[in-house]
Image (tube, rainbow, N blue to C red):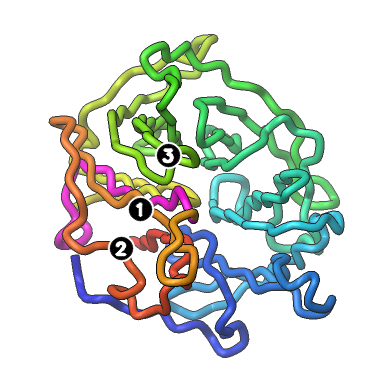
């Protein structure tokens, strides 16, 4: 919608191998690889920090090795930053390993992560704070959990986990060559469930075609949880990326249209082109009023963003209000 604007990292965290793995309310979350354990550990995530993209304020987070448990394998972080509990922000970290997957919490004042071990929540996740609870959704099946949080002398901790049973979505059952992608986002006091259904023609989803997009408002007053399909955001827009979602008043900025869902989502790294693995992305705009989808005017590619081929990693939306 506008010319490319490069966000400069403050000198104290600037490095060529820093990856951005989350964003929220003008903040970017970055991680750097472990540097002090030799070549074997270079693919671990190490230092983790938040950077305000406008004021350049830096908030350093505890080292990720405090909850990696020394397991080998590559750890990808998804760390949405939320202000939904108490007077302090909470950072939610989801670490993906070859052996196990871990969820952890942190807030200012804590010296280490609060690790949520033993949870049956495996796979890529989406997060939202809603009605005083942290809601965690599995990305590839519509399975939702609510985390009740409390504070003690250690900081923020999980006191209870509840599986929020959603009505059976018979029309969304995965067929032999189909795949789902699910997200949650808070919009005007409602928790929305966004479901994309794709038809796939090859293994690993390297080629897939969009079949259907639907948006539901969740009703927690019933058990199972009720669903109401919606076809209007009252002029607002929803932005979806690989690490989370944000709702946004469309009238704040020129060029942002209302009642649209903007998708920028990485789903594969298996295409081998030009001597390196290139990721594949979903980049399209969906209109909830008439159920139509259209591609972005500009292709998401390393060439368009001035980065070396093979170095364009997780695409993120960076949103802030005036």
Does residue 176 appear in the picture of this structure? yes
Q: Is residue 66 left or right of residue 188?
A: right
Q: Is residue 243 left or right of residue 231?
A: right
**Neighbour tally class for label 3: few under 14, some 14-19, many 20 plus, Cα within 10 Å:** many
Q: Are marks 1 and 2 in contact (CB under 8 Å)?
A: yes
Q: Residue at x 47, y 60 (%)?
A: 314
Q: Which residues are magenta?
A: 252-269
Q: Residue at x 56, y 27 (%)?
A: 144
Q: From the viewer's perspective, is residue 142 above or below residue 227?
A: below
Which numbered mark, 2 or 3, is in the foreground of this view?
2
Kindly indicate the quadrant of the structure image that contains residue 190.
Answer: top left
- Residue 104 image position (x, y, % from top left): 72, 49
Dot 2 corresponds to which residue?
300
**Neighbour tally class for label 1: few under 14, some 14-19, many 20 plus, Cα within 10 Å:** many
Q: Is residue 279 left or right of residue 138?
A: left
Q: Earlier in the sequence, mark 2 or mark 3?
A: 3
Which of the pair 255/265 is nearer the observer? 265
Q: Is residue 322 magenta?
A: no
**Neighbour tally class for label 2: few under 14, some 14-19, many 20 plus, Cα within 10 Å:** some
Q: Residue at x 47, y 58 (%)?
A: 24
Dot 3 corresponds to which residue?
185
- Residue 156 image position (x, y, % from top left): 74, 48
Judged from the image, the secondary structure of the residue bearing numbered disc 3 is: strand
Q: Is residue 258 magenta?
A: yes
Q: Residue at x 77, y 60 (%)?
A: 110
Q: Is residue 140 left or right of residue 228?
A: right
Q: How many marks?
A: 3
Which of the pair 39/243 is nearer the observer? 39
Which numbered mark, 3 or 1, is in the foreground of this view?
1
């Amino acid at each position: 919608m506008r010319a490319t604007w490069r966000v400069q990292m403050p000198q104290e965290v600037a490095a060529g191998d820093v990856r951005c793995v989350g964003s929220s309310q003008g903040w970017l979350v970055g991680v750097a690889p472990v540097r002090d354990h030799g070549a074997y550990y270079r693919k671990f995530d190490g230092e983790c920090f938040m950077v305000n993209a406008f004021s350049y304020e830096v908030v350093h987070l505890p080292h990720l090795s405090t909850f990696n448990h020394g397991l080998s394998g590559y750890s990808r972080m998804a760390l949405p930053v939320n202000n939904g509990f108490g007077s302090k922000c909470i950072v939610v970290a989801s670490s993906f390993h070859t052996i196990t997957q871990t969820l952890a919490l942190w807030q200012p004042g804590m010296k280490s992560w609060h690790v949520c071990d033993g949870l049956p929540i495996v796979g890529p996740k989406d997060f939202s704070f809603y009605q005083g609870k942290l809601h965690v959704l599995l990305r590839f099946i519509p399975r939702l959990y609510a985390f009740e949080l409390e504070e003690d002398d250690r900081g923020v901790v999980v006191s209870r986990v509840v599986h929020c049973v959603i009505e059976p979505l018979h029309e969304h059952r995965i067929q032999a060559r189909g795949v789902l992608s699910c997200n949650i986002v808070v919009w005007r006091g409602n928790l929305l469930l966004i479901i994309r259904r794709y038809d796939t023609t090859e293994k690993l989803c390297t080629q897939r075609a969009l079949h259907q997009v639907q948006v539901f408002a969740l009703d927690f007053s019933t058990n199972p949880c009720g669903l109401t399909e919606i076809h209007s955001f009252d002029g607002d827009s929803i932005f979806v990326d690989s690490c989370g979602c944000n709702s946004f008043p469309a009238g704040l900025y020129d060029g942002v249209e209302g009642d649209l869902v903007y998708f920028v989502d990485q789903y594969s790294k298996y295409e081998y082109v030009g001597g390196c693995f290139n990721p594949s992305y979903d980049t399209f705009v969906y209109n909830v009023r008439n159920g139509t989808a259209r591609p972005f005017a500009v292709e998401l590619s390393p060439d368009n963003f001035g980065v070396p081929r093979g170095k364009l990693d997780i695409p993120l939306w960076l949103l802030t209000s005036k």
